[in-house]
Image: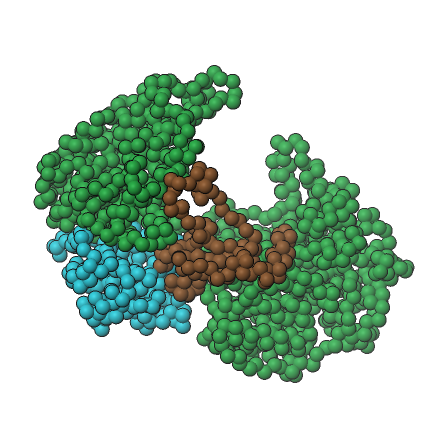
Chain colours: A brown, B green, C cyan
Amino acid sequence: MFQIYCPYCEELREEEEFHPKGEAHIARPLDPEACSDEEWGDYLFFRDNPRGVHHELWVHAVGCRKFFNITRHTVSYEILETYRMGEQPTITAESVSGDLAGRESAATARQEGVRA
Amino acid sequence: MSQPNRLVRGGRIDRTRTLSFTFNGQAYQGHAGDTLASALLANGVDIVNRSFKYSRPRGIVAAGAEEPNAVVQLGASEAGQVPNVRATQQALFDGLSARSTNGWPNVQRDLMGLVGKLGGQFMPPGFYYKTFMAPASLWMTYEKYIRKSAGLGRSPAEADPDIYDHLHRHCDVLVIGAGPAGLTAALAAARSGARVILCDEQEELGGSLLDSRELLDDESASEWLATVVAELSGRHNVTLLPRTTANGYHDHNFVTLHERRTEHLAETAPLANGHRQVRSRLHRVRAGRVILATGTHERPLVYAGNDVPGNLLAGAVSTYIRRYGVVPGQKLVLSTSNDHAYRAALDWQEAGREVVAIVDAREAPDGELVDQARSRGIRVVTGSAVIEAKGEKRVTAARIARVDLDRFAVAGAVEELHCDTIASSGGYSPVIHLASHTGARPTWNDEILGFEPSLVKGVSATGGARGTYALPQVLADGAETGSQAAVACGYTAASVELPRVDAIREGQACALYQVPHEKPTLRAPKQFVDLQNDVTAAGIELATREGFESIEHVKRYTAMGFGTDQGKLGNINGMAIAARCLGRTIPEVGTTVFRPNYTPVTFGAIVGRHCGELFDPERYTALHQWHVEHGAEFEDVGQWKRPWYYPQRVAGKLETMHEAVARECRAVREAVGILDASTLGKIDIQGPDAREFLGRIYTNKWEKLAVGKCRYGLMCKDDGMVTDDGVTSCLADNHFVMTTTTGGAAAILEWLELWHQTEWPELDVTFTSVTDHWATMTITGPESRKLLAELTDIDLDRDSFKFMDWREGKVAGVPARVFRISFTGELTFEINVQAHYAMHVWKALFEHGEKYGLTPYGTETMHVLRAEKGFIIVGQDTDGSVTPEDLGMQWCVGYDKPFSWIGKRALTRSDTARENRKQLVGLKPKDKAVVLEEGAQIVLDPKHPVPVPMVGHVTSSYYSPTLDSGFALAVVKGGHQKLGETVYLPMADGQVHEAEIVSPIFVDPKGERQHV
Amino acid sequence: MSNVNIYDSRADAAIPAESPLAFSYHRSGAPAAGAASRVVLRERPFLGHLILRGGAIVLDEAVRDELGMNLPGRPQGLVLDASGERSIQWLSPDEWLLIVPGGEEFALEGRLRERLGDASFAIVNVSGGQTLLELEGDAVPELLMKSVIYDAHPQHFPVGKGVTTVFAKTTTILRRPDESRWELVIRRSFADYCYRWLLDAGEEYAIGVVAA
């Protein structure tokens, strides 16, 4: 059960108030008719599923009803930052790459610990 | 009745209060302050269960949550049955009734015990899989008997009379465990001003202080404990929760606590102040910082016969003596790898019973407790261990011998000591369960010979839970950890003066898990690792020989740690054995990861108040009471309760649904019907860009919709598939009201916001739900105009108030918006009023409607009427794979709109544009009496050999009173080109129905009736 | 913003109106409040509820002029006028809930629209769709702990705060207009569920209902 900082309500709120809406920063092509079937298919159906830093779109459904973005580590589930629509993340897979070695090893360790 | 093992003094029980209870039908007595386990031991009850696989007699081993054997079925009444209760954690109350969960026909004489005796070679690990695997069809039969003999407890067959609930709690610092470390941690955090919750799973706060030998500030530990508890309970910023187990540690410091509020009082919760009280409660805690002060579990030693009743943990022996005044036997042999366990022998001797010997695996133990034992004349045998316990239903002797730990071998002559109790201790494991719920793997620490928790953000461990064992250090560590947690939450550290403790110096422990036997492990008498699942050292050795190298695989193969105790006692011993067999170290073999819940949680607490009538919200319209009073049957549509049909009493007999629906349908087609349509989603849309927005979100055009006009719209997702539909009306140039399907209301509002907020924030438009503000009453049928005319000032003339127009005016004196739209194909007026007045308007319509035959109808009739017209219901006739073109609704698609609206591009993707997609058609059964089954598969050639290619399925199917025939809507591959063809619907019972593909519009194909 | 349909959906006082809890009082009754009641519930039905949408700066001036109170600009803000009869609550960065005595809402909407002129804003009357419940008594914080996931500890939820959050399995607006009183704004169609939930959860506090 996450606790999520809503950048509009400016406080930490319970996950039950939010809905996840998939990967963030998937822009709709400005000219859909100019897209090939393949390009349009990529836009519709293909998403990243990284192990590590991931940007996600969420909405504070039971709250301010605003959409915003979350940068989340998909292994530790740590939410690294949340930011408003139209803003860019300050933490990305690249930006944490120095720090990533540590994170990754912790991540790998968890991955291997199959639960009883 | 006597309690042969009860001491005349000592312990924290109240000897003035005697409580009666029964175990397996036999009456016993105990005292207030007892657990069921301590009372059973006081009464000399040795056998509490039969083991899972071998059906061997088992006795109480531990004194806490780690108990693997004394798992009982509680309850005198049927409704009060509770399975899976650890007798060591169940407080005794007067009238308590418990039974063994294993053992058939009973624990003393057990049929399956025979299997157990033959045991060994017949039931290796994987026994059930290997033996009962084939034939698969018989597994159900085997399972029934295996389960009956294994006995996992049973749930009550009657409804639970008790109530349960959840509390959503928030705090700065959650301290789990109220032993010495937890108490000083809570104290430090509380004094800083932080909001603190301190929980502990036991009946009393105090943890190890409850049976401690140490003096704090020159007084017994219980004096200091009382002072600290008094301070904490007096603080408004502290919540103390005894009898509360932290069962799950979830993401971001969300912890679930299970509080047993009345389980220590009676089988069902007694009234409090005349009100029912909650039996058990789940606290859903969100904490700023979590402190794990969960202490340790003692590890038993693994030796032959270590499961015979009378084998106990050394610490449990001390607990029973010091806390409950119970000595669980006459003659004790202690087998240990450490100093701390010596307490058991000292306590035993102080209780006036005989200590036969202390058998210490170390060559030269030299701690204070060792000296004390020696000076009291207790025989201490060094470099040795108990290698085998003798006895069947109770220990009769201990076989001890010198052991060579490096070579894992018995190194000397075996001596047999007569005794009835063997206490063992192989050291202590920090209780890391909660920390590992996060997925963080614990790390092995050679110094403490145990795993330490790995901690995620926001969590700390203190005291025994992180391998700090000496009391002075534990107290200090707790205070420091509590203080740091409070500071991390923004409070200023406060001082905590620690009590002076005359620490008992303890020597270094040695690593001992499995004790060698004269025979090799595979041939020695059984040495149990996991008592609950009957996993032996031999089983683990065999697993490693069969190629299971990862501890996770070994666990699955042997079922080690899979019981309700999750291997609290055995897992580390099992890993040590696997490590020995594989020639590796314990950390190399892997680690052990636990998952929630720490101990079983009753379903009541999980459900809380969300049961019965409050299981799920029921949404009502403003007219609900009228529907109830008029005998409506209700249908669930999402969370809404909608009238389904209104059965009438005809000649003393209530109509069937079929009769009621036929009557309601005829009323609409011939006179006038009324439907409560308030559940449709309604979204108020304002802004100069509202029209532009509609054009992008709907498939059809909106730029020319005039004020006063309504239009049907279809919505797709960007994959081109239909997702919702409804009528949107232009209230003013910059103002629209959109209707959505009943089920889609919330999702569509979110959908609109998604596009507005993420893609088109430049559009000046707002969306507000007005679903609940407006009540909607649909009057429909040829007489509807006449009826409405009696109640309204709106000009209803067919030329001034046309089909697909809306008007404002008063209906029955109430301001209303009336929409001339139709979902039945008949002349229809949808009357919208503020919901507070809906009942008034509805009743007024009935006052005037009687002479026109005004008939209320429900969703079933609505479905029939709309299907007769070929009007789709999104989600019934569509399933997320249907395009507007598949529905034959090209008339509702604005192909030439300038903006590439949501869904447009996908319509030309190869898969969406291909021929032979499933398309919406009507089906007319050849036999008019047949109503096809919704979901029935359609084939072109019923004689085709199996597998028969299926070309579609029925989406909606009803009997039509208007057609006097069954009829259906269906999707059929290439259906639009197949009008007039015959298809077949093979049914499960062997019948094959025949139907003709027809237009989906069955009634009034030209659509004239709605225009009248 | 002009070019919208402004419509007074409130009927004359002579027309009987039913609160969203009418059915609930009928079915579940209303346990009387007594000396032992540690929670007292009172419905305040038929108030005027308006949703205001737009930029804070634009709306603030109009609201101040018309109602004499400041638009709460900070998240979770709740402001009441001197009489306590009128309130404005922050719902989102561009959305506020205005609650006024029943009957005032239509005229107020007109006056606000007048003042706001061509600015970018929206006003929606939602009076028929929700109702306001007042809770008083020393057990209210605990009752709220049973019901809402939001932290309603007085330290975290001072007077003048209001949030939209999860209530049992539905949603509510939770507000604290003064030291002793809590308010729930609930949706009409969920009102019966909320009412039954409150009676059930409040039973151990001898919850009493003061009928509207």
Residue B427 figure quarter: bottom right
Give the camera-side residue of B681 and A49.
A49
> Which quadrant is the C terminus of chain B positioned in?
top left
- Establish if B142 lies above or below B507: above
Give the camera-side residue of A96 and C73.
A96
Extreme-front residue of the structure: A34
- Whether residue B230 is visible to the viewer of this picture, yes or no, is no
- Establish if B599 lies above or below B358: above
x, y percentage for residue B913?
A: 40, 31
Residue B333 figure quarter: bottom right
- Establish if B907 lies above or below B520: above
Residue at image coords 38%, 63%: A9
Residue at image coords 36%, 31%: B886
Residue at image coords 62%, 75%: B477
Q: Is residue B964 left or right of residue B303?
A: left
Q: Is residue B260 left or right of residue B659?
A: right
Residue at image coords 43%, 54%: A58
